Image (tube, rainbow, N blue to C red):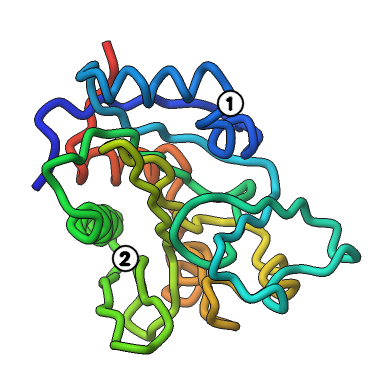
Amino acid sequence: MGFAALARVDLGEVPYVEAVEAVEAVEAMSGWADECRAGGGDRLFLLSHPPVVTYGKRTDPADLPTPSAGLQVVAVDRGGQATYHGPGQVVGYLVANVRERGPADVVRWVEHGIVDALGALGFTARRRDTEPGGPSLVGVWTADDLKVASIGMRIRGGVSTHGFAVDVDPDMAVYDHFVACGMDGSMTSLRRIAEREGRLVPAEGEVRDAPADALGARPNG
């Protein structure tokens, strides 16, 4: 499907609430979404977050970390279960006009883009179809069925927000404190894969470039 003129915008580390939950309240992100609705262009924002666990309405409270874990926990209006964001991840937010595209098509396009991006970095990955009545398998998975990238989208007023997170080299011990994506023990990282294969983990810049290129995002300006 793709977008004819998807602009890439690189940001540094941005607190989650400021960058995403505040789509409704913070002028910067709200302005971007409003501009997109007015036909002002589609953007892929690439950034990182300080440590935070976010969760949607369907998340089982038992899946969330306890206060003793010391993790910020934020309820958000997006698809998906509990998800971790933190240092060592590459996070991408697609703020794009998707009026002529179904939500499933947008998610599938992002999945295929990340699969292609990881392939360009030398990592074999795939998307999986969710079985009726089964847990959601949205995201990108390794050949041995471990999740290396999470995806959670929201579409409102014909504009997508939220996006994806690729686990490059995060603190994997964080996943001991909650159930990620409704599937305990399902997460891995590029570092773990690289160490198992006896190779170097790619630099963050490489991992930023790969999905941007695969999704057709070009530097803004």
Residue name at image x 29 percent, y 87 percent: 131
In the picture shown, does residue 58 fall above or below 151?
A: below
Q: Position of residue 5 (x, y in %)?
A: 15, 26
Mark 1 lies on a secondary structure that is: loop
Task: Kindly identify which residue carries mark 2.
Answer: 123
Task: Kindly identify which residue carries mark 1.
Answer: 25
Q: CA distance from mark 1 to mark 2?
A: 38 Å
Residue name at image x 70 percent, y 49 percent: 51
Quadrant of residue 130 in the image? bottom left
Of the residues under marks 1 and 2, which one precedes in the sequence? Answer: 1
Along the horizontal axis of the image, is 14 left or right of 115? right
Q: Position of residue 63 (x, y in %)?
A: 67, 76
Give the residue type that dot 1 points to: Ala
Along the horizontal axis of the image, is 104 left or right of 182? left
Quick one: 134 or 213, which is closer to the camera?
134
Quadrant of residue 10 in the image? top left
Quick one: 198 or 34, which is closer to the camera?
34
Residue name at image x 22 percent, y 26 percent: 218
Mark 1 neighbour density, 10 Å: few (under 14) some (14–19) many (20 or more): few
In the picture shown, does residue 57 fall above or below 74?
A: below
Give the residue type that dot 2 points to: Phe
* The residue positioned farthest toward the front in the image shown: 157
